Image (tube, rainbow, N blue to C red):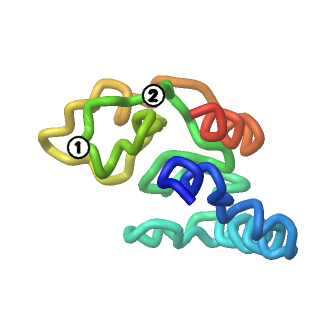
Amino acid sequence: MTDSEAHHSLEPAYLKLLRNGQLQQRVAQAYQHLEDCDLCARYGHVNRKQTTDGAVCRTGELAVVHSYGPHHGEENPLRGWNGSGTVFFSWCNLRCVFCQNWDFSQKGMGRKTTPEELAGMMLAL
């Protein structure tokens, strides 16, 4: 088998998880975490299904996406054969002082995106 054939025969891990039912279990667990949010290192413990008050990320149940697209500027091991995909989220909880994306990452620019829309973006990339 050539390297090219090997790369095309690899199956994405999420397809195996879908087939064996683990993907649905993980989705349910993630939604449970939103009710007492501990999904980042800040452990806000806010019910993000009901409010964003007190949430460090200022994000509710839906992610806020500013933009997404292909990215070819990373080093070869990171971008693969066709570039890496980039999704820019708003309301980043890291709040890095020298963030090059501060304008949209901290000001909430973008739109609320359903999980299905977000998955579609990722799969398109």
The C terminus lies in which quarter of the figure? top right
Q: Which residue is mark 1?
A: 75
Residue 98: % across, % down:
13, 40
Tag 2: Cα neighbours inside 10 Å, few (<14), some, or many (≥20)?
A: some
Closest to the observer: 39 or 54? 39
Q: Residue at x 76, y 60 (%)?
A: 15
Amino acid under label 2?
Pro
Please say if 67 is above or below 4.
above
Report whether 103 appears left or right of 46.
left
Residue 20: % across, % down:
85, 75
The mark that comes first in sequence, 2 or 1, is 2
Amino acid under label 1?
Glu
Q: Examine the rendering and report whether any part of residue 88 can be seen.
A: no
Q: Residue at x 72, y 34 (%)?
A: 117
Q: Which residue is mark 2?
A: 70
Closest to the observer: 10 or 6? 6
Numbered circles on residues, count: 2
Please say if 28 is above or below 61.
below
Q: Examine the rendering and report whether any part of residue 74 can be seen.
A: yes
Q: Residue at x 42, y 55 (%)?
A: 56
Report whether 46 appears left or right of 22.
left
Closest to the observer: 64 or 15? 15
